[in-house]
């Protein structure tokens, strides 16, 4: 069924198609509708995972970037996802980079985006999260936080500190994003020199809310190891491996098409191998009480299982939803049940 829908979607501008899809997701999240849909998508009890002092009904969640403004959280829960990471959210609303800024690589089952943290800002997002927080049944919700584009790097910690204080009482966990390639200079904050004091500033405001750091796949293993070892000395909950990549190796898409698209972060199937490697690497460097969340190229229950074997406690996806549709979580739950049987 979704093949027919996607045949229509792929003729649309990718960002327009996403907005149409979000409208459907919001409908699935309406009272009454969400309980009905959830009956067909919920995971088996055997998938339950304890992490960060929370009980996850399954390891499968939605990565940041899909629901930037916390508008589709309950719809995504209805479709079978048991944690949703909203954002990236910045202190002030911002429109992001000029369009076009989202592109499909159909042959590679991938996306390139240079959205640039387009979001409604922390005040509007918090208002939606407050409503979700009051619901008796809901998914676990995290917020991915980032600095505004016009905030100088020297003052970036102030943005992250403000965001942490603003969201600490309405989310289950928060993620520090210094690894997106689409905000100029942001990845400079990922070096130990800048990152450690920034993380300390967030921890001071987060209170008991678990804090994670999302890392870039484009640094070398040596560079990442040095940063992860320092992060392991702080009271963070864990690390997410990994954000989108600027690399373009081993793609089926023609070089001329890639050149016409230009800059942006690549997600989806081509990122799977690197994300798997990083999950294993980071797991070896972190103490047992810190978790790894694996993201990048997750398309099936077998992908989830492989990330778990590499050391991931939880797994997230985004691009697979675009290519497989709203039934992707349900399909993954069925595959995980077969793997576990």
Image (spheres, helix red, strand yellow):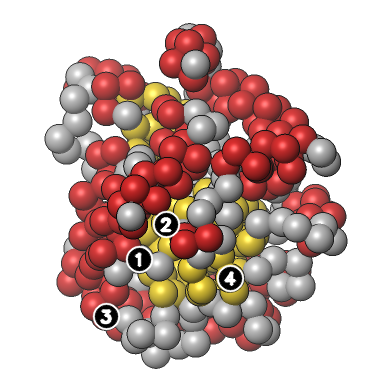
Disc 3 versus disc 2: nearer the observer? 2
Q: CA distance from mark 4 to mark 2?
A: 14 Å
Which residue: 53% across, 60% down? 45
Residue 31: image quadrant is top right
Which residue: 58% across, 54% down? 82
Q: Residues within 10 Å of mark 1 (few under 14, many from 20)?
A: many
Q: Which residue is mark 2?
A: 315
Which residue: 54% across, 77% down? 52
Q: Earlier in the sequence, mark 3 or mark 2?
A: 3
Q: Earlier in the sequence, mark 4 or mark 1?
A: 4
Question: SS class of the residue under badge 2?
Answer: strand
Q: CA distance from mark 4 to mark 3?
A: 24 Å
Q: Earlier in the sequence, mark 4 or mark 2?
A: 4
Q: Tell me, yes or no, whether the two marked residues, 2 and 1, touch with CB atoms within 8 Å.
A: yes
Q: Is residue 273 above or below residue 282?
A: above
Q: Which residue is mark 4?
A: 55
Question: SS class of the residue under badge 4?
Answer: strand
Q: Residues within 10 Å of mark 2 (few under 14, many from 20)?
A: many
Q: Earlier in the sequence, mark 4 or mark 3?
A: 4
Q: Tell me, yes or no, whether the two marked residues, 3 and 2, touch with CB atoms within 8 Å.
A: no
Q: Which residue is mark 3?
A: 285
Q: Earlier in the sequence, mark 3 or mark 1?
A: 3
Q: Which residue is mark 1?
A: 312
Q: CA distance from mark 3 to mark 1?
A: 13 Å
Q: CA distance from mark 3 to mark 2?
A: 19 Å
In the displayed structure image, the side of residue 15 where residue 260 appears, left or right: left
User: Is residue 150 in view from this perspective?
Assistant: no
Residue 224: image quadrant is bottom left
């Amino acid at each position: 069924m979704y093949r027919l829908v996607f045949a229509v979607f792929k003729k649309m501008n990718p960002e327009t198609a996403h907005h149409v899809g979000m409208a459907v997701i919001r409908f699935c999240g309406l009272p009454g509708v969400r309980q009905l849909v959830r009956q067909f998508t919920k995971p088996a009890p055997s998938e339950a995972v304890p992490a960060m002092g929370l009980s996850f009904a399954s390891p499968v969640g939605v990565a940041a970037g899909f629901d930037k403004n916390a508008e589709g959280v309950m719809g995504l829960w209805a479709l079978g996802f048991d944690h949703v990471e909203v954002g990236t959210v910045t202190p002030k609303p911002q429109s992001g980079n000029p369009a076009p800024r989202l592109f499909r690589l159909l042959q590679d089952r991938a996306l390139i985006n240079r959205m640039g943290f387009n979001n409604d800002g922390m005040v509007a997002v918090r208002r939606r999260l407050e409503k979700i927080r009051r619901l008796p049944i809901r998914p676990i919700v995290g917020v991915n936080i980032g600095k505004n584009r016009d905030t100088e790097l020297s003052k970036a910690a102030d943005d992250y500190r403000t965001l942490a204080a603003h969201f600490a009482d309405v989310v289950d966990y928060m993620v520090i994003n210094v690894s997106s390639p689409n905000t100029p200079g942001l990845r400079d904050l990922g070096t130990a020199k800048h990152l450690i004091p920034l993380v300390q500033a967030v921890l001071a405001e987060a209170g008991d809310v678990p804090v994670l750091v999302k890392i870039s796949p484009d640094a070398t293993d040596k560079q990442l190891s040095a940063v992860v070892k320092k992060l392991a000395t702080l009271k963070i909950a864990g690390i997410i491996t990994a954000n989108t990549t600027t690399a373009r190796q081993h793609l089926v898409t023609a070089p001329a098409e890639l050149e016409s698209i230009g800059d942006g972060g690549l997600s989806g199937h081509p990122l799977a191998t690197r994300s798997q490697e990083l999950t294993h690497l980071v797991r070896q460097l972190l103490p047992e009480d810190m978790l790894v969340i694996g993201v990048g190229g997750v398309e099936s229950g077998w992908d989830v299982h492989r990330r778990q074997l590499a050391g991931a406690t939880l797994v997230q996806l985004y691009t697979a939803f675009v290519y497989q549709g709203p039934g992707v979580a349900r399909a993954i739950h069925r595959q995980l049940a077969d793997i576990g049987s």
